[in-house]
Image: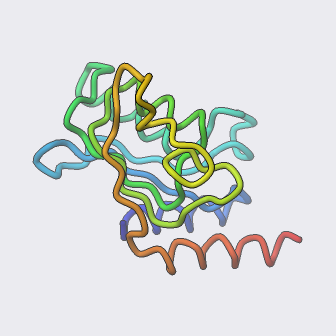
């Protein structure tokens, strides 16, 4: 989560919402990193999780990221939760919960829906206060 927080802070420096993400292989090796790039790249899909999933898939040369862990500073939105499901991620470790758009248990629980073809284990609240504070600091300066 420490590296994900560093990535989040990098995103904030470029004017993007500070969210950082990593995809770790089953052995803990970093397969991919990402941070929000929506503002920088004018890309509505430039969420940290999607960027990290794309990098991981390119590194391991398959879109099937089975047994991997997605570590992210903020609970994934429905798009990112869906991307993690489609990539067959095994676990999501998240920092701050998102009471407005979270899709891993707070507003929706997309990744553990019994109708889904793939379900993801969720571990929430890891370094939650730090992850939340990065977001609060960013929005205090932008509102």
Numbered-mark total: 0
Looking at the image, is 5 positioned above or below residue 140?
A: above
Residue at image location 60% in from the left, 74% down from the top: 134
- Residue that extends furthest to the right in the rendered view of this protein: 143
Instruction: Where is residue 48? Give x, y as percent.
Output: 53, 46
Looking at the image, is 41 positioned above or below residue 102?
A: above
Q: Is residue 9 left or right of residue 143?
A: left
Instruction: Where is residue 3? Give x, y as percent.
Output: 37, 65
The image quadrant of residue 32 is top left
- Residue that extends furthest to the front in the rendered view of this protein: 114
Looking at the image, is 28 positioned above or below residue 50?
A: below
Quarter that holds the N terminus: bottom left
Instruction: Where is residue 26? Give x, y as percent.
Output: 14, 43
Instruction: Where is residue 97? Give x, y as percent.
Output: 55, 62
The image quadrant of residue 23 is top left
Q: Nearer the viewer, residue 111 or 37?
A: 111
Q: Nearer the viewer, residue 118 or 67?
A: 118
Residue at image location 27% in from the left, 38% down from the top: 90
Q: Nearer the viewer, residue 41 or 70?
A: 70
Colour theme:
rainbow
Residue at image location 60% in from the left, 50% down from the top: 102
Quarter that holds the C terminus: bottom right
Q: Is residue 47 left or right of residue 57?
A: right
Q: Is residue 140 left or right of residue 30?
A: right
The image quadrant of residue 18 is bottom right
Residue at image location 23% in from the left, 27% down from the top: 60
């Amino acid at each position: 989560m420490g590296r994900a927080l560093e990535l989040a802070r990098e995103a904030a420096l470029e004017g993007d919402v500070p969210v950082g993400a990593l995809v770790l292989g089953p052995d803990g090796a970093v397969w991919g990193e990402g941070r929000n790039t929506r503002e920088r790249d004018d890309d509505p899909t430039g969420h940290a999780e999607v960027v990290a999933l794309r990098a991981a898939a390119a590194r391991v040369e398959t879109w099937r990221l089975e047994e991997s862990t997605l570590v992210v500073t903020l609970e994934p939105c429905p798009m990112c939760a869906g991307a993690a499901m489609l990539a067959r991620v095994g676990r999501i470790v998240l920092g701050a919960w998102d009471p407005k758009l979270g899709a891993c248990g707070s507003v929706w629980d997309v990744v553990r829906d019994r109708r889904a073809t793939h379900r993801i284990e969720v571990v929430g609240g890891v370094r939650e206060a730090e992850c939340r504070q990065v977001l609060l600091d960013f929005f205090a300066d932008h509102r």
